[in-house]
Image (cartoon, grey):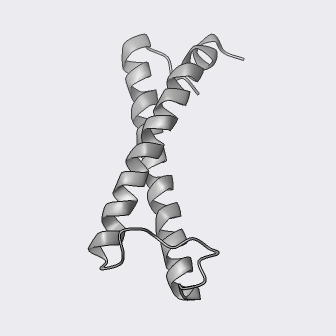
Amino acid sequence: MKASKIAYKPVGLALGAVSGMLAGALFKQAWKVLGHDDDAPDATDEQRTWSEVLIAATLQGAIFAGVKAAVDRAGATTVRKLTGTWPG
């Protein structure tokens, strides 16, 4: 395993935590903009419809994946600029 990959591990973990928090906040805002309640439905919420639960889960997954990819890519690019090597 490359030394740059090992050195990037703690940075990657920190970026993962930040991206999770950012994605959660973005999802809450997107859910409100779509005109829904403040809280997205849980899969076991009896009062919510199948379509509402599945739309919320799909939207949340898409936002999380997009934010994670953007943050990971920005972190790797920054490491390359600072060290001259790609961490992956």
Up/down of 41 relative to 51, above or below: above
Quadrant where the N terminus lies?
top right
Q: In screen coordinates, is 88 left or right of 68?
A: right
Query: Foreground residue, 25 or 6?
Result: 25
Q: Quadrant of residue 84?
A: top left
Q: Residue at x 50, y 83 (%)?
A: 52
Q: Position of residue 24 (x, y in %)?
A: 42, 53
Tell me where residue 9 appears, x and y as whole percent.
59, 22
Q: Which residue is drawn at 35% across and 78% down?
A: 36
User: How far from the left and from the top, in percent, is residue 32?
Assistant: 31, 70
Count numbered badges in the picture.
Answer: 0
Q: Which is more toward the observer, 36 or 76?
A: 36
Q: In which quarter of the image is the C terminus?
A: top right
Please determine whether, in this image, residue 61 is positioned above or below residue 69: below
> Residue farthest to the right?
1
Given residues 72 and 24, the one toward you in this image is 24
> In the rendered image of this protein, does residue 41 appear above or below residue 20?
below
Residue 46, percent from left and from top = 60, 83
Q: In this view, does 73 lie to the left or right of 88?
A: left
The answer to whether 67 is drawn above or below residue 75 in the figure is below
Q: Residue at x 43, y 20 (%)?
A: 79
